[in-house]
Structures are given as structure tokens and as C-alpha cells.
Image (cartoon, rainbow, N blue to C red):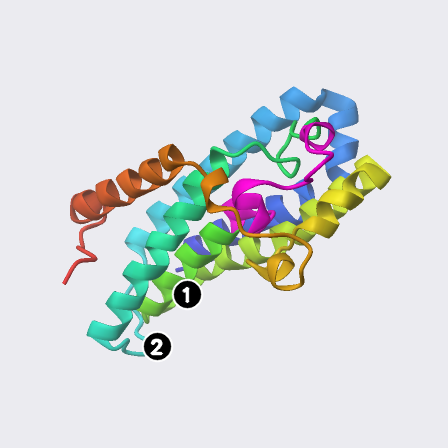
């Protein structure tokens, strides 16, 4: 368990205390943007690999017993929504991603389109839902550490990204921020945007559905347990 806690702390630390702070700028000024991105990607993948290995080796310490039927059904729904947000978010150009600042100039009439109308951080929202699903379906200490770490980073990430983008882009960031929200559908509910499902695209939806189907079919082979009843 100690190895898992250390791996989780390393993963959370590089995202919260490096990527989202002034330390990132100091490192970039010394080694350059591309070098930083490469090193950060390697560190993130190494941390995920470390967490996965430590999680597999961690003892099972039960904290609660999830209701088998209800928790599994809820987890399946949450993961389906998570895959939709992650896949569609990755396939949608956005000013919130590294190098996506040019998108602000292309959407002056409507600052946010597609999935960004629902939430300006679809990838992180999807990761948060995925983590919640696995916390619902598992009641052991190792799962709380692993999936709780992903949930914490995904929940804090939007605010760190927004702060970084606002500092870098100034007034150019404001129209996009006003027209979108971190919480899904909040900007639409407040009248600052509208729902336009056609903008998401059938291709992106199909890709998300295919990815989810592949996960369901391969989950037992990859992780030793099937999410299906």
C-alpha cells in the first residue's frame, strides 16, 4: 500500500504543483516548451504505470461493501458518459488544451461550440466520472487511493488550467470563459450558451461508443474482472 500512496502522491504532485503553477513557467524558460511537454508526458505515464503496478499488488482492505446490482449499473452508466466526454473532448479543438489558444480567434461569433457548450473541460470531466464510477463499484482502501487521486486531480485541474489560460491570454480568454462552464450544462442553464448536439458530430459519438464497447469486451482480460452482470 505504501508504494501505491507514493505513486499517487507523485502523480498528483506533478499535476498540481508543477503543471498548474509558476514552476512550470520557470522550467519552460530553461528547457523550452516542447522539452517540458515531453518530459511531463513521460513522468505522467511513468506515474500511471507505477500506480497500476502498486494497485495490483496492494492488499485488499475492505472499507465498505457496495450494493452489487445498483453499484454496477450506476458504474456502467457513469463510465459510458465518461467515455463520451473523454473521446469527444479529445476530438474537439479547444483553447483549454496546450497549443489550442488559436481557437479563440476562430470562434469570435460563438466562443464555444460542440461539447464545449456543455463543459469547457470535457476530458477532465470524463476522467472525474470514470473515477467516481470505480469508487462506487469498489469499497477497498487501494481503490480509494487510486481512483480518489484521479478524481482529485480531475476536479482541481479545470481551475488550474483556467487560471493559467487567463494569465497567459488576458482579455482574449474572457468571452470563452463567459460562454462556458466547468460544471456540465451550467452555462446553458444560466443562459450564456445553448445546447447544439449536432455540432458534436455523429463520428465523434460513434468513436466514443466503439471505445466503450471495446472496454466492456476486454475489461476482464485486461483487469481480471468483468463490469457486466
Callout 1: 10 Å neighbours few (<14), some, many (20+)?
Answer: some
Q: Is residue 2 visible?
A: no
Q: Where residue 28 sits in the image (x, y, percent)? A: 74, 27
The residue at 29%/52% (across/down) is 56
Residue placed under numbered mark 2 in the picture: 63
Q: Is residue 34 left or right of residue 48?
A: right
Which residue is at the far right? 171
Looking at the picture, tell me which residue is in the foreground, 228 or 200: 200
Q: Where residue 217 sits in the image (x, y, percent)? A: 17, 44
Quadrant for the N terminus, please. bottom left
Residue placed under numbered mark 1 in the picture: 144
Q: Is residue 226 above or below residue 199?
A: below
116 magenta-colored: yes
Q: Where residue 208 sits in the image (x, y, percent)? A: 35, 41
> Which region is colored magenta?
103-124
Q: Is residue 138 left or right of residue 23?
A: left
86 magenta-colored: no
Q: Earlier in the sequence, mark 1 or mark 2?
A: 2
Query: Badges 1 and 2: C-beta atoms under 8 Å apart?
Result: yes
Amino acid at each position: 500500500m505504501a508504494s501505491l500512496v507514493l505513486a499517487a502522491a507523485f502523480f498528483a504532485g506533478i499535476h498540481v504543483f508543477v503543471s498548474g503553477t509558476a514552476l512550470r513557467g520557470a522550467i519552460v524558460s530553461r528547457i523550452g516548451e516542447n522539452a517540458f511537454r515531453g518530459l511531463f508526458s513521460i513522468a505522467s505515464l511513468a506515474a500511471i504505470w507505477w500506480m497500476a503496478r502498486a494497485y495490483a499488488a496492494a492488499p485488499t482492505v475492505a472499507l465498505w461493501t457496495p450494493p452489487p446490482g445498483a453499484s454496477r449499473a450506476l458504474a456502467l452508466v457513469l463510465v459510458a458518459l465518461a467515455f463520451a466526454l473523454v473521446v469527444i473532448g479529445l476530438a474537439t479543438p479547444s483553447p483549454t488544451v496546450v497549443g489550442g489558444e488559436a481557437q479563440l480567434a476562430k470562434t469570435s461569433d460563438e466562443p464555444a461550440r460542440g461539447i464545449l457548450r456543455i463543459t469547457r473541460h470535457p476530458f477532465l470531466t470524463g476522467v472525474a466520472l470514470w473515477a467516481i464510477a470505480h469508487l462506487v463499484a469498489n469499497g477497498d482502501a487501494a481503490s480509494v487511493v487510486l481512483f480518489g487521486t484521479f478524481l482529485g486531480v480531475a476536479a482541481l485541474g479545470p481551475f488550474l488550467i483556467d487560471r493559467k489560460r487567463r494569465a497567459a491570454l488576458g482579455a482574449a480568454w474572457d468571452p470563452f470563459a463567459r460562454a462556458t462552464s466547468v460544471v456540465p450544462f451550467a452555462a446553458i442553464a444560466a443562459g450564456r450558451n445553448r445546447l447544439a448536439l449536432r455540432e458534436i458530430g455523429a463520428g465523434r459519438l460513434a468513436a466514443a461508443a466503439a471505445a466503450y464497447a471495446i472496454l466492456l469486451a476486454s475489461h476482464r482480460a485486461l483487469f481480471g474482472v468483468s463490469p457486466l452482470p
